[in-house]
Amino acid sequence: MSILGNQCKVEILRMFRNPYYIFWSLFMPIIFYVIFTKVVNMNVPDKGLWNAHYLMSMATFSVMGSAIMTLGIRMVQERAEGWTSFIQVTPLSGIIYFTAKMLGQTLVHLFSILVIFLAGALINGVSLSVFEWITSGGWILLASLPFLGLGVLVGTMKRVDTASGVSNVIYMLLAITGGMWMPMEILPKTIQTIGSWLPAYNFANGAWEIIRGNAPEFKNIIILAGYLLVFMVLSIYIRRKQEAV
């Protein structure tokens, strides 16, 4: 347990020293939140609900990006630099290595959620019940697992520049088709149809439902669980193929 705890601590420290995490997971979501709630007039009937809705959009946007980009690119870097090979001759087992990465990433996600929630309360006075704050935060934390799986899948790539480019494209496409930047209702029908079956929309929609006093839809849970399974199976298969070479 001490080895796992120390490795988790190292992973968290590395994350906070990463400028990509600070920029994409904290700075950009808060900037977008200010723009779309303070600068751009969205002509919404309920301004208070829109402020809370977009706060959940930016919290899910932040966590999704951190899971896909930060985790995946870091794994590619470590393999390219020979760090993963070096670990094999140390007391740090592969299981503890990957467990520490997942736990460290999850704790960082919790920090991101708290920071963005605090920004929403300070910038727009977003006021939710204690139950809604906790359940929406808990949903975002738990439902981010498929994106951690996607990050691990990105981490199977061989080149850092390839992983960075691919993860950026995936991140932006998921954010747009998931209705995180603008309401799904104003997007073209084709994008709405496609987006409803992608993980980003189902991730964000669970949080949107909670702030409206509802539970996440059963469809959201099933689709996210399906993507988690697919991403993990693909990651395991690719890694075994790479190790066999």
Image (cartoon, rainbow, N blue to C red):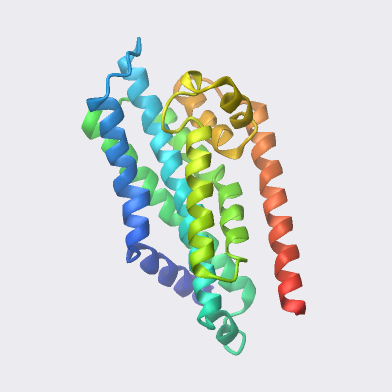
The quadrant in which residue 92 appears is bottom right
Q: Position of residue 195 (x, y in %)?
A: 59, 31
Where residue 18 appears, as percent x and y from the top left, is: 35, 64
- Residue sitting farthest toward the bottom: 89
Q: Is residue 49 left or right of residue 79?
A: left
Q: Name the residue rendered at 46%, 49% in the picture.
A: 65
Picture coordinates of residue 8, whole percent (x, y): 47, 68
Q: Is residue 118 visible?
A: no
Q: Vertical placement of 205 versus 106: above or below?
A: above
Quadrant in the picture for the C terminus: bottom right
Could you tell me residue 43's position as x and y percent? Answer: 32, 13
Label count reads: 0
Q: Is residue 123 left or right of residue 55?
A: left
Camera-side residue of 38 and 172: 172
Q: Relative to residue 138, is residue 218 depicted above or below?
A: above
What residue sits 45% from the left and 53% below the top?
Answer: 66
Q: Which residue does the image show at 43% across and 51% down from the upper left? A: 109
Q: Is residue 167 visible?
A: yes
The residue furthest top is 45
Where is the N terminus found, in terms of image quarters?
Answer: bottom right
